[in-house]
Image (spheres, grey):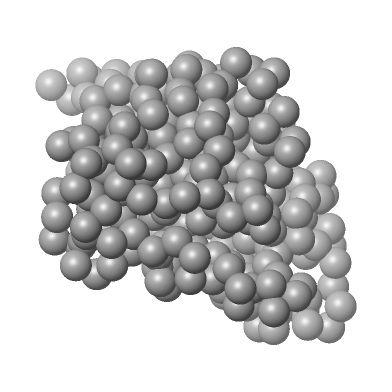
């Protein structure tokens, strides 16, 4: 039976805690994990451009002792000849032990999981969700803030198409957050996600203004890029693309330990002058993506933290 990760909603609080703990152990004891995936292969099937997600998945498998196959563009495979996701997944199951798939169409990784005989991990599907990025985000928040419970989280920018904020929102149902949704009407959080908040007791406030007062109470400020590739109307994109720029002056009322996250790439959302402030944490967030994905690969292959601890004890 395969163990897919298609949506962050699959994971209980206990499973999230376990993955964060495993990632933390990987950070502290990388040598212990160096051969945990010896002889294993991941197929990275990226139908859409990626830097951090694809390379961190590939680095994660290599650092665990495994190998990588795959493609970084649909044009580099038989997809360009019309091959379906279902057929691709079935064929790749012959060559690899895990598939990590990114696709512009929502639901494509789920289709792959229904046809593959090996585990499928969703590496981002359209504007739907991005579960492995969310685990990197939660790892980052936990290691820096020291907790996940009762946090105030500001989400700013493209909340309509932003799969990272959608996944973060649904994952945080376990941790009693308060969200501040900061976006223009054109990019506001979709109604079904606001309904999800109401149904799960997640408090939220909506804002169109973006200034020092708006972010003054935040523990986490999660900035997002306005994604040109998600717009069918480029005139609409031009109207909203530069609406929310975080300047250094806007941090004048921020909490001393507030952290700014961004799934990257950055285009025009955060002034470069912020990079050398203690608030900036987006590059560490990208680094944590490696550790989170190592933990996910271990979990997918049935390697648990208890197994690792027992191995450590046996070697003493």
Q: Residue 9, relative to residue 248: is it above or below? A: above
Q: Is residue 141 left or right of residue 158?
A: left
Task: Please name whichever residue, 53 or 88, is drawn nearer the observer in this view of the structure.
Answer: 53
Task: Please name whichever residue, 313 or 143, is drawn nearer the observer in this view of the structure.
Answer: 143
At 48% across and 32% down in the image, what residue appears? 179
Q: Quadrant of the C terminus?
A: top left
Residue 241 picture location, percent across and down: 54, 71
Q: Is residue 181 visible?
A: yes
Q: Residue 286, relative to residue 293: is it above or below? A: below
Q: Is residue 289 visible?
A: no
Q: Residue 2, relative to residue 226: is it above or below? A: above
Q: Is residue 70 left or right of residue 148?
A: right
Q: Residue 293, relative to residue 47: is it above or below? A: above
Picture quadrant of residue 312: top left
Query: How many labels, in total?
Result: 0
At 64% across and 18% down in the image, what residue appears? 200
At 64% across and 30% down in the image, what residue appears? 9
Q: Quadrant of the N terminus?
A: top right
Q: Is residue 284 left or right of residue 181?
A: left
Residue 48 picture location, percent across and down: 63, 71
Residue 173 picture location, percent across and down: 55, 22
Residue 37 picture location, percent across and down: 42, 46
């Amino acid at each position: 039976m395969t163990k897919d990760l298609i949506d962050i909603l699959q994971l209980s609080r206990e499973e999230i805690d376990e993955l964060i703990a495993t990632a933390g152990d990987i950070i502290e004891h990388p040598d212990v994990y160096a051969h945990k995936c010896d002889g294993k292969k991941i197929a990275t099937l990226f139908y859409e451009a990626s830097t951090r997600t694809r390379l961190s998945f590939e680095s994660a498998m290599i650092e665990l002792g495994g190998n990588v196959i795959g493609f970084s563009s649909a044009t580099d495979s038989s997809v360009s000849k019309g091959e379906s996701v279902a057929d691709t997944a079935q064929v790749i199951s012959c060559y690899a032990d895990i598939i990590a798939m990114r696709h512009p169409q929502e639901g494509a990784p789920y289709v792959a999981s229904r046809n593959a005989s090996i585990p499928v991990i969703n590496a981002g599907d359209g504007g739907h969700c991005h579960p492995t990025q969310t685990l990197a985000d939660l790892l980052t928040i936990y290691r820096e803030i020291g907790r996940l419970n009762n946090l105030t989280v500001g989400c700013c920018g493209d909340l309509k198409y932003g799969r990272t904020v959608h996944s973060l929102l649904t994952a945080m149902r376990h941790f009693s957050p308060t969200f501040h949704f900061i976006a223009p009407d054109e990019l506001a959080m979709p109604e079904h996600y606001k309904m999800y908040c109401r149904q799960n007791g997640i408090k939220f406030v909506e804002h169109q203004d973006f200034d020092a007062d708006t972010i003054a109470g935040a523990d986490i400020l999660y900035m997002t890029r306005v994604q040109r590739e998600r717009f069918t109307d480029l005139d609409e994109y031009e109207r909203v693309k530069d609406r929310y720029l975080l300047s250094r002056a806007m941090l004048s009322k921020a909490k001393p330990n507030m952290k700014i996250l961004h799934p990257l790439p950055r285009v025009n959302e955060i002034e470069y002058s912020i990079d050398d402030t203690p608030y900036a944490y987006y590059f560490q967030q990208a680094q944590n993506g490696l550790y989170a994905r190592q933990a996910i690969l271990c979990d997918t292959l049935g390697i648990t933290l208890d197994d690792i601890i027992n191995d450590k004890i046996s070697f003493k």
